[in-house]
């Protein structure tokens, strides 16, 4: 039986610039014919991954349960090999050759050609293999013929590597039971067979209402200039907006368990960490300037079986317009409730729905209202285990 977990959140941010485009302006999008504020899914996922790092520091999840997206995998391998007692210069050479065996080229600056998303367990296992096969990894194994094109050189390096080394390394690239790799997936261009399909999909957050950009004109004064000198010593503008965002994500429970090599305990821990991070984690863009730390005040989680996902963004196809003395967030929540109910009537499906409602929105029978985030997470975890 396929089980999906969907989370919907309404989050009203004070003036801010959480996620900038290439001009430094807040990202936006056209939706329903009007301009909306937007925070990209990449930004939201990055915030959640940073939240996972905080959970590691609190010992709520293990350091081996997370991954790193980096071009500096060579540095990580060399550091661990030096800690095992190997000379740094030799460790660099052996690590380069081991990566070349998998067609992962390291450039002269010590960085890989593209960002690699590797679990900590994968990195540790690569180190163990290099350490174990230290004496058998030789330069002659993987030196490409001069004059070869880069692509052919990589293939030649892989083909000429010690078969046992290559076989051992191929077993390593399995996601490493890293929660963020399992949730968000990865692509390894040179090893497509080692790609991992994501168990989770995260939508771009959009405002429930239309927005206009605003500008903050700022000046700064040199503290050490003479007192009789007037005028600012620096000036400029910062663009910002204020918006009530609709946020949505969906997790395929069976795929998450599969990606974590059928470790249901870790999958349960990972799902809870993801849902908590989705609610609590915030984008960091320009927060030193705006301090827009505004948690979601309306969160809906549904555990659904044998049903297609339902993004409820169309509840806001017509931009919400709050009247005087009317809460924009509450009105948005009530529109979301009506859209959820109408889709349930039309398409049916078995589900359990839990709601964190801090704005006293009318739920009209949508799910079970709970007083705290902890209660919301506890009920959700219980529902997937039934």
Image (cartoon, helix red, strand yellow):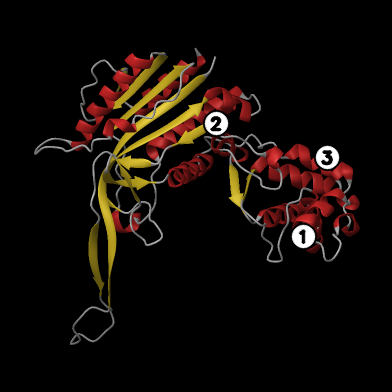
In this view of the protein, can residue 264 be seen by the observer?
Answer: yes
Kindly indicate whether the residue at mark 2 contacts the one at mark 1 (C-beta within 8 angstroms): no
The residue wearing badge 2 is 199
Secondary element type, mark 1:
helix
Give the Cα distance between marks 1 and 2: 35 Å
How far separated are the C-alphas under marks 3 and 1?
21 Å
Task: Residue 148 in the image: state x and y as whole percent.
Answer: 81, 62
- Quarter placement of the N terminus: top right
How many residues crowd around disc 1 within 10 Å: few (fewer than 14), some, or many (20 or more)? some
- Classify residue 173 as left or right of residue 236: right
Point out residue 240 in the picture as x, y percentages from the top left corner.
Answer: 28, 56
Q: Crowdedness of circle 2 by 10 Å Cα count: few (<14), some, many (20+)?
A: many
- Determine which quarter of the picture holds residue 197: top right
Q: Is residue 368 above or below residue 200?
A: above
* First reached walking from the N terminus: tag 2 or tag 3: 3
* Neighbours of disc 3 within 10 Å: few (<14), some (14-19), many (20+): few
Image location of residue 137, percent across then percent down:
87, 52
Left or right: residue 365 versus residue 142 is left
Please identify the quarter of the rendering in which residue 8 is found: top left
Most foreground residue, 92 or 322: 322
Task: Tell me which corner region of the image, top left, top right, bottom left or bottom right, holds residue 334.
Answer: top left
Q: Residue at x 13, y 35 (%)?
A: 326
Which residue is depicted at the point 80% across and 60% down? 93
Q: Which residue is mark 3?
A: 167
Residue shown at the point (53%, 18%) measured from the top left: 2
Pick whichever of labels 3 and 1 is earlier in the sequence: 1
Whether residue 13 can be seen here: no
Residue 92's disc is 1
Q: Is residue 224 above or below residue 190?
A: below
User: Disc 3 vs disc 1: which is toward the camera?
Assistant: 3
Element on which disc 3 rests = helix
């Amino acid at each position: 039986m396929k089980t999906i977990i969907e989370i919907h959140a309404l989050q009203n941010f004070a003036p801010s610039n959480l996620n900038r485009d290439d001009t430094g302006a807040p990202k936006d999008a056209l939706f329903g014919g009007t301009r909306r504020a937007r925070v990209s899914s990449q930004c939201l996922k990055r915030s959640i991954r940073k939240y996972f790092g905080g959970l590691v520091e609190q010992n709520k999840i293990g350091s081996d349960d997370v991954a790193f997206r980096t071009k500096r995998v060579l540095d990580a391998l060399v550091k661990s090999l030096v800690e095992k007692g190997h000379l740094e210069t030799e460790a660099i050479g052996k690590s380069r050759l081991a990566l070349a065996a998998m067609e992962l080229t390291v450039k002269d600056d010590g960085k890989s050609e593209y960002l690699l998303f590797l679990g900590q367990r994968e990195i540790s296992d690569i180190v163990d293999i290099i350490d174990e096969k230290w004496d058998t990894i030789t330069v002659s194994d993987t030196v490409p013929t001069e004059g070869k094109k880069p692509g052919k050189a990589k293939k030649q390096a892989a083909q000429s590597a010690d078969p046992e080394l290559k076989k051992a390394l191929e077993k390593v690239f399995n996601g490493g039971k890293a929660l963020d790799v399992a949730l968000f997936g990865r692509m390894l261009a040179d090893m497509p067979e080692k790609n991992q399909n994501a168990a989770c999909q995260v939508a771009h957050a959009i405002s429930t209402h239309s927005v206009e950009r605003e500008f903050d004109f700022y000046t700064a004064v040199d503290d050490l200039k003479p007192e009789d000198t007037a005028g600012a010593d620096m000036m400029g503008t910062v663009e910002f907006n204020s918006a009530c965002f609709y946020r949505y994500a969906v997790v395929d429970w069976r795929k998450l368990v599969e990606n974590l090599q059928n470790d249901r305990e870790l999958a349960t821990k990972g799902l809870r960490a993801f849902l908590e991070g989705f609610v609590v984690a915030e984008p960091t863009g320009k927060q030193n300037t705006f301090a827009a730390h505004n948690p979601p005040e309306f969160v809906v989680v549904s555990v659904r079986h044998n049903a297609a996902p339902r993004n409820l963004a169309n509840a806001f196809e017509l931009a919400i317009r709050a009247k005087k003395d009317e809460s924009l967030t509450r009105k948005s929540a009530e529109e979301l409730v009506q859209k959820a109910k109408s889709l349930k009537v039309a398409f049916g499906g078995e589900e359990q729905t839990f709601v964190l409602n801090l704005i006293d929105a009318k739920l009209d029978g949508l799910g079970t209202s709970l007083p705290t985030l902890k209660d919301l997470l506890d009920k959700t975890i219980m529902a997937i285990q039934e």
